[in-house]
Image: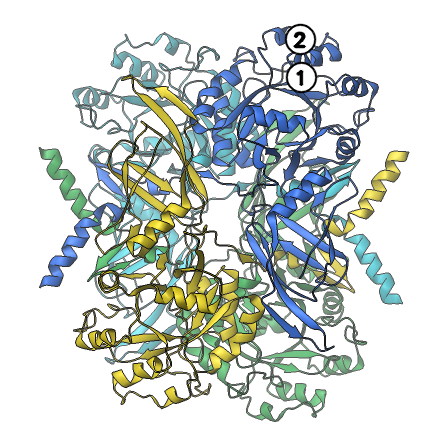
Chain colours: A blue, B cyan, C green, D yellow
């Protein structure tokens, strides 16, 4: 008897938990079937005291040849765990101008309130869109673009870029190599050299969407330019990346910052503390890629040992990847398994003699023809 | 020796299969990580000789208060397996007008070429957006909307709707009940009765996104109006529906047509041959829901029998759901398991005496307070 | 007032729908988080009037060196949509014999009741496990195995196989090539030739798990043997196949049968009407693979045409894959897109001149060095 | 010219990266379609200096009424990120004894080498299986069970449990309430009281699989017993839990330990530092649940503020869940959103006046009728 009362009491108490579909005033709410509105954390531990911001500084909207309203870019970025973005609509290319008044200040102005509320750093930017060669350039941290609107294809390429430089912009060369059929499109032309010498070129977009421009990585390494990775998204992010696989995120630039502020982002870009991240792959200066690897991958003390058939002591080690990055390693020297795959937020157990085998992290590129090489300390 | 040659030959022959990442002219292509560009079939068998078209006749773009360019609506629809759609931007509500020139013909014109190429039937539509009550009305199969642009909030509600009716539009009342706090917003007001009597009201949006307007279903049944289900999407479909569960698709209207043509769609809408589909749920006239259920669910002949403890013969039957729909059934009479869940494209095995138990298909609504009741023939 | 009553009534009426967690007698049931217990349909249309059964005739349990009780194999098969299976524990290899009494009849006896209830055809089988070469042989449709238990490694290989043949078994050679380092392990040795000539060899396991034994396919084609694909699963299926990708199922043999009966399965195996299916790939006799392709892939009539820059008429066609199989095609002659990927249950739209381009279906193998070539009729 | 050579070089260099399917000696390897062999990290930050171990101390194998070989339990646990497990086969119930020699030491002996290699703490255990009431008891950290084998159903329940207690086992009462129809099955009977008073009862299984035994939680709180959550898995974990949803893991006990050692596990169990975790839900002593919540959930400093219509300052805060746990919160006092859902490893942005609203974390239970209540500090 007492039990029945108890049960009824509970049933009432938990009523708010138990309703999958609620009916209010004759409307049944089926929103348990809505996609959760949440920001997914991208987990990457701090690297040498720097926070690792997730950034995408190349995106389009309906104000040039993109397909979405500027606020969508903030919303996508927030959901996908990005920290800082720039909308970089083309100045010279506005195919929707019959319906939409061209104005390169508007994407920033429209997106700004959403970005502020969602805690996304919105960097003002634009894409200076010249014929290829020399191609396209993104300018970040720009000022008012009213003046830019006078830019047209009759203006010289140099003048176009220099309008951004005059505003102390951070300028990077977009996707060199994207039109391989055109002579000079993937060469370090005098025009580029001129920008570079005049400090008007700060970085290169080494990865654009799913294209890894390998020579551009070498240029960044050899000339100390910032390695950038970005989506150049025109359509929806959700239609572009196959995130059914856990190692697939939108292409981005990992920026190693002192703080999550616009000023820190700029400082880190200027200091070349970036790594491009595209699906399985990381591209960047060797020291940055190495620091990132070391921050993410951990060898735990051996928990067990055995004597193998040849009388040697084999120890078992757990290798743990504490990040959402992906590392695939192939042994190039010493003893140990030939191949180790560290999926995001996962671990592997390996059996090996204690020692310090050398592994090539084949999903990293520190030059076009060189992977990061790491010593795996097995104590 | 011979084997080596053979192997090398094969390695060469299959080179094109085996390259996950291709390098061309110094650009490595990582597009194995792109989301596949494909149209997912939504599988629903024909129903009594009618094809079942998947339709969404309520969507917005940047031309009113939506967030995407009209072509995105076609692209989403194509990917998600829809057959027919309408973009129905608000006539009277254009919050982006500082940047975008209001023009209710443009969404259709812009989307049309994509729709033609992708094989999507694009029905021209608009949303007549009045104060609530009476609320909003969608007009489909409309003509030029230049005249509509003179519509403003000073105009009477009746005149506004009648501009569409004059073009022989198919008109349905959107989401009655969406603003429950407002007196008269979820009532069959004289204004509605007037439209209805004058054949200017053809249907009601019984499901809007994740809201099931239950009284509206009863009105459709009692007054022989077309049951509509639609997304009313403003943002991205991919951000709205949690399709990680296989029974979740965007909300839509299943239309039972003679052919996949605009004329057949109109004929079927006029003939009330529709069922609204929202996640697990189906809402519609009993005969339509029943026909749909019968077309999808199949009881295979028993493949095995046993004698149970009480000496009775228990047979094993396979119940097969040949569709992407979801059916959850609870027994109300006869023998058999108390509950049967038929997930999309799957089967269940049940053990029962032969007979004809009665099940209530609790994920269907043929009235606000009535599920479809089916006899499950177990021979 | 009336509304309140109405609402309460509904709230009560739908109570059974709305409870995600039910509390009964002080126990809260959280089983909404259980994996649904369902059989997933694998959809493949009938092929030339034959049903396509999904079969796996090579599996292990704790009765030899497998890790699960025999009923688990039925359960996995039922869930994954298989129609017919055989448990084929090793006769000569029983590493768990300290705990489990060896008996090759037991796996079948134990699994049989589950199979009958679930509607799975359970074929009695065993694996005759000889040194390599010649290797291992699966015998299906065998009788009592008591006699087999006298088999030991001292017995000649021929005697061992012939015990199965004496029971009129269907015998296939397992995974030739699995131990490439051993001389003769991947050759058509006299021993094999002897079995073949004496009709004691009916087929070869062309695909074993994730290994495609390419020479074995050629032997099947040249000598008219049955092409088999199987898992040889020892551990759990769920740990072996990455079914997060929709084209990944466990490896299996598609058997084209007259009816879903054991006799029909045997008839089809004897008549060589099989295709091995492993992830993206199909391997088999050209006529079987072609029939399968034709049954699954459909070109719908063109729905739209345009005149291109060169004044040619380009039509738009929808290519539809009505199956859960995967087809990747590369054009080898005629006009049309260079590559078409038909994901499971999906469609593509292509733009092409009308004609009949030739495509190589590169995810099929009709010999080790030959894909199926199809003419794509574009009317 | 130079470019061509460069390209060829790269193509060769990256050959090992680019081969999705490798052909060796006539065998094509399709193992890109294998499920990755990895241990998934379950991320939960340290709690007050304690590590949070993920444990399941109730599992079965073929040695009683389970369906898998003992090593499978280690493999499942390793993959799913568990740290410590116990196999607890029934002593008195061995339905497979016709094929498998009953021996309660064997599951531990067989699983031990795998556990050592994989770094899983394997606690020796057994299930003392008496009629209900009193029901079943799990004994952990036991010694040799040879003596236990003399146990039979004729022996008194007390003697059976005391054999374990004599080995200084950690003993918990399993799933009270699992057979609600039986009188006394869900009551604190004199038999239980006797064990309790004699220190032979250390904990209760508050969650068994998907059943939350609510009264058992109150008993644990009131009598200071250890709260346990476990799977009691007999079949495969992969068939039991719907891990397509990111908040669904197998049911487990979170144990707050000083170190990842068997001794620390025992110490923590004895000290009652546990929380049961079942899908969305956490059950435990208030102090443990509160510490866990505080370790996982973080309010970041406000990044933006606005003045609302009423002239009040509204700040925007990011609430971040740094764990794989799930928290659903409903406001009970103060200002702020009515409901906040913190999905695993994700964040929410909320807009609120600064203050300290009170939230009930409705997915936690600190008693059968009480959720954890937290003050959310919004500075």
Q: Determine whether B40 is above or below D72 in the image.
A: above
Q: Is residue B211 left or right of residue A214?
A: left
- Same chain shared by disc 2 and disc 1: yes
Q: Residues within 10 Å of mark 1 (few under 14, many from 20)?
A: many
- Give the residue drawn at x 21%, y 46%: B370
Q: Determine whether A80 is above or below D266 in the image.
A: above
Q: Is residue A197 left or right of residue B85?
A: right
Q: Give me the C-alpha separation between circle 2 and circle 1.
A: 9 Å
Q: Is residue B365 left or right of residue D7?
A: left
- Give the residue drawn at x 61%, y 24%: A266
Q: Is residue B216 left or right of residue D233?
A: left
Could you tell me how many numbered marks the image carries? Answer: 2
Q: Position of residue C128 (x, y in %)?
A: 64, 82
Q: Identify which residue, A71 or B243, lies in the foreground.
A: A71
Q: Identify which residue, A309 or B160, lies in the foreground.
A: A309
Badge 2 or badge 1: first in the primary sequence: 1
In the rendering, which numbered label is found on residue A151? 2
Q: Position of residue D209 (x, y in %)?
A: 35, 63
In the rendering, which numbered label is found on residue A128? 1
Q: Quadrant of the N terminus of chain B?
A: bottom right
Q: Chain of mark 1?
A: A
In the rendering, which numbered label is found on residue A153? none
Q: Position of residue A306 (x, y in %)?
A: 64, 74
Q: Chain of mark 2?
A: A
């Amino acid at each position: 008897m007492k039990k029945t009362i108890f049960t009824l009491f509970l049933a009432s108490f938990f009523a708010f938990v138990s309703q999958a579909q609620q009916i209010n005033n004759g409307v049944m709410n089926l929103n348990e079937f809505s996609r959760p509105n949440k920001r997914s954390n991208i987990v990457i531990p701090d690297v040498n005291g720097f926070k690792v911001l997730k950034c995408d500084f190349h995106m389009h909207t309906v104000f040039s040849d993109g397909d979405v309203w500027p606020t969508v870019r903030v919303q996508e970025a927030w959901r996908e765990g990005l920290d800082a973005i720039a909308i970089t609509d083309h100045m010279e290319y506005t195919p929707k101008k019959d319906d939409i008044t061209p104005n390169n200040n508007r994407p920033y102005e429209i997106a700004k309130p959403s970005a502020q509320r969602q805690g996304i750093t919105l960097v003002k930017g634009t894409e200076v869109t010249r014929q290829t060669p020399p191609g396209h350039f993104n300018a970040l941290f720009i000022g008012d673009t009213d003046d830019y609107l006078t830019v047209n294809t009759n203006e010289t390429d140099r003048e176009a870029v220099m309008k951004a430089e005059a505003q102390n912009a951070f300028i990077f060369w977009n996707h060199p190599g994207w039109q391989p059929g055109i002579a000079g499109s993937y060469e370090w032309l005098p025009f580029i050299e001129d920008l570079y010498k005049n400090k008007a070129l700060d970085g290169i977009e080494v990865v654009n969407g799913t294209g890894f421009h390998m020579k551009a990585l070498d240029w960044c390494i050899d000339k100390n330019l910032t390695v950038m990775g970005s989506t150049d998204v025109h359509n929806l992010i959700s239609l572009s990346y196959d995130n059914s696989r856990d190692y697939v995120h939108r292409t981005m630039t990992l920026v190693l910052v002192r703080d999550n502020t616009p000023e820190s982002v700029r400082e880190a870009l200027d200091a070349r503390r970036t790594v491009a991240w595209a699906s399985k792959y990381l591209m960047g200066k060797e020291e940055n890629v190495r620091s990132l690897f070391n921050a993410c991958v951990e060898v735990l003390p051996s928990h067990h040992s055995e004597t193998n058939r040849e009388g040697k002591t084999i120890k078992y080690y757990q290798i743990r990847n504490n990040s959402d990055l992906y590392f695939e390693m192939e042994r190039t020297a010493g003893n140990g398994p030939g191949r180790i795959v560290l999926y995001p937020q996962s671990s592997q157990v390996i059996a090996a003699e204690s020692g310090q085998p050398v592994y090539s992290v084949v999903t990293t590129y520190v030059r076009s023809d060189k992977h990061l090489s790491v010593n795996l300390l097995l104590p």
